[in-house]
Amino acid sequence: DFEFKDNFVIKAINHIHKQSIRMSKLINDISLVNKIDHTKKTNFELFKPSELLKNIIDEIVPVFKKKKWSFEINYKGNFRANKEDISCVFTNLINNSIKYTDTHGEIMISLLKSSNGFIFKILDNGIGIAKENISKLTNRFYREDQSRSINTGGVGLGLSIVEKIAKKYNAKLEVKSELGKGSQFMIIFPFEN
């Protein structure tokens, strides 16, 4: 008779489960990259990025429980885009900030009006990124520290997807970071895209 009390078997099953979740995410991300690369026409609609961001935050709030976070919205206007694209940008950047900020760390999310569009900004006091690696962050499958992917579940496609979507809207992605001190990701979406 086979018993699951064996610690090795339980650990092996947990490892297989984590890897299957990671593979599922990888397949979904590759599918999304392919869709972005090969979709000529996008369904644009007029919507409020502030409402979209509030909905995403409401879904993610349980993850924020132990983190100190703040949320500022001073842009409440409309934007014409594919809502799924903008949701993907917000979600990827928020999830990265959560993954790489300590349990009791601080995260600040802002949606601001700019002279010709709006700015989504996320600032954290997480682990930060070495200056020499910032330019590589949007490369497909790039991981600053390969060992982190096992712990965070990442596959190195999130920021590549964010950059592709930014280019689609003539938006500008800016990254500032200091190793051990935190990161700031800012994306500026122009109204004319």
Image: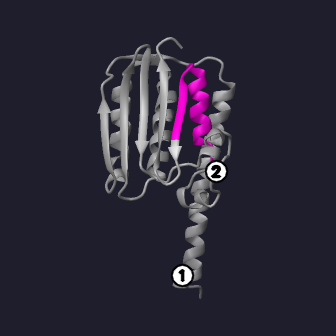
The quarter of the rendered structure image containing the N terminus is: bottom right
How far across and how far down the image is residue 135, in percent?
64, 38
Q: Residues within 10 Å of mark 1 (few under 14, many from 20)?
A: few
Helix, strand or loop at label 1? It is loop
Q: Residues within 10 Å of mark 2 (few under 14, many from 20)?
A: some
Tell me the quarter of the picture where residue 102 sits. Answer: bottom left
How far across and how far down the image is residue 190, in percent?
48, 17
Q: Which residue is mark 1?
A: 4
Q: Which residue is mark 2?
A: 143
Q: Is residue 8 left or right of residue 88?
A: right
Q: Which residues are magenta?
A: 156-176
The quarter of the rendered structure image containing the C terminus is: top right
Amino acid type at circle 2 is Arg
Judge whether residue 162 is colored magenta: yes
Nearest the viewer among 85 and 109 is 109
How far across and how far down the image is residue 192, in percent?
50, 11
